[in-house]
Image: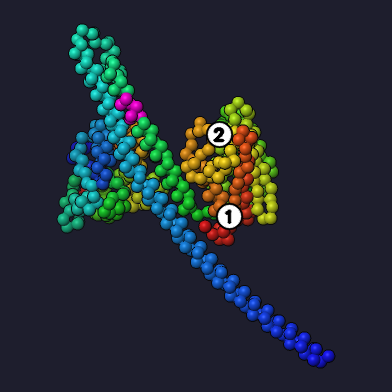
Amino acid sequence: MVVLAGIAIFMVRRSSHARDQADARLRDSHLNLEATIDERTADLREANDEIQRFAYIVSHDLRSPLVNIMGFTSELEELRGDIFKRIAALSREQSAASPAPENATDTAEPLLEGSDKQLSEDFSEALSFIKSSIGKMDRLISAILSLTREGRREFEPVWIDTKELIEGIVATVAHQAAEAQAEIRIDALPNIVSDRLALEQIFSNLIDNALKYLKTGVPGEITVRGRTKLGFAIFELSDNGRGIDPKDHQRIFELFRRAGTQDKPGQGIGLAHVRALVRRLGGTMSVASELHQGSTFTITLPINWSANRNPRP
Amino acid sequence: MSNPVTIIMIEDDEGHARLIERNIRRSGVNNEIKPFTSGTAALNYLLGEDGSGVDHKGSALLILLDLNLPDTTGIDILKRVKENKYLKTTPVVVLTTTDDSHEIKRCYDLGCNVYITKPVNYESFANAIRQLGLFFSVIQIPPAAT
């Protein structure tokens, strides 16, 4: 008995010793892991800051030459007017037989004929392509600028009455909604602690998109629903619009990428921006959609977000 | 603008400088425009050999300033001008591509008189400069002195 008890005690001691050792090792490796994570996070943050600065400088410096290109293109356009007016006048002088037109004022388009007219039109066409491209480039640069500016803004968690916030957004798009014969319904929504401006941008982008990409001729129905699950608020924005081909579901979230029929103006920024904001707020977003079947965007956000617990990625 | 006022244009991009000059002229302003393409050259002219700015005592100047210069920042020039006892009353018009609100506030804090963002759209650009020209033709400018 005594021997057995002795062995038992010995074994218990040994196993508890082993357990203590394992505990200590676990604690060590845990600490190590945390230190490594901190280090990596700091590295990532630094890299991210650098990219932000880079994007800002690039977009800013690209603007300056653009002002020149646009400026002198417009100056050329004025010169074009003068040159062709002169050509018209000269050719009239040469064919002295034809009487001078009565409306030959400074402002009237010069009367050109045959090959001169063709030249003038080619000239205008070239200029208008240059100008529209500059306009497009300017919009892209502005978009990059505002994205990087947005990326540098510090988020501030406040308590938000989500339904009220979305009703506010809906009020601002009432005109577009009426034009598209769309009805926007807002169900009961969970309130959350988050950044107000970011949330406004997220929902107004999604509602804008829903209104923009409705099916022509079909009255729009847009619904915002919400529920909570394990500390997260889940928002769903559904529409009966034109839908998105599943092969494009990734693409639509990429910067400067768009999908489907390109009949609406846009730069392909909205959703990329929205997803970046959702991520910074510690959430995720996804889309469920089929072509012609409408779309549902789902956004999951922490109910009680705080800037410290979810440091910037 | 009473005639002897000289416009000092500090702009590194010669294209911008040309466009600005053309549009100022189109608004009917015929004052002398002295262009500088670098901050150093402009400061040398403004502050003079001895760096005191005494050379401009009694002359009326108006400064058109771009912020993104290769050698010094426009902010630095603005600061130096506004700190100089002869030049501090000289109106400074910041004309730049930046529309960053921090930058704008900073310039006004330092005593810039007007801040204008250069629009890429040329119609707006030309318009802005012509309006500025009209503004130049009516504002009163004190002689840099005392």
Of B114 and A60, nearer the camera is: A60
Residue at the (29%, 46%) spot, across then down? B66
Residue B73 picture location, percent across and down: 30, 53
- Image side of residue A212 versus residue B2, left or right: right
For the N terminus of chain A, give its image quadrant.
Answer: bottom right
How packed is label 1: few (under 14 Cα within 10 Å), some, or many (20 or more)? Answer: many
Q: Is residue A227 above or below residue A310?
A: above
Task: Please report, as a chain letter, where disc 2 is located.
Answer: A
Sequence-first disc among 2 and 1? 2
Q: Residue at x 24, y 17 (%)?
A: A88
Mark 2 neighbour density, 10 Å: few (under 14) some (14–19) many (20 or more): some
Q: Which residues are magenta?
A: A122-128
Query: Circle 1 — which element?
Result: loop
Q: Is residue B146 visible?
A: no
Compared across the picture, whether A60 is left or right of A166 comes to left
Q: Name the residue: 25% across, 35% down.
A: B22
Q: Is residue A41 above or below residue A95?
A: below
Looking at the image, which is closer to me, A43 or A25? A25
Residue type at mark 1 is: Gly
Residue A282: numbered disc: 1
Pointer 2: what residue?
A212
Give the vertical position of A104 relative to A22 (above or below).
above
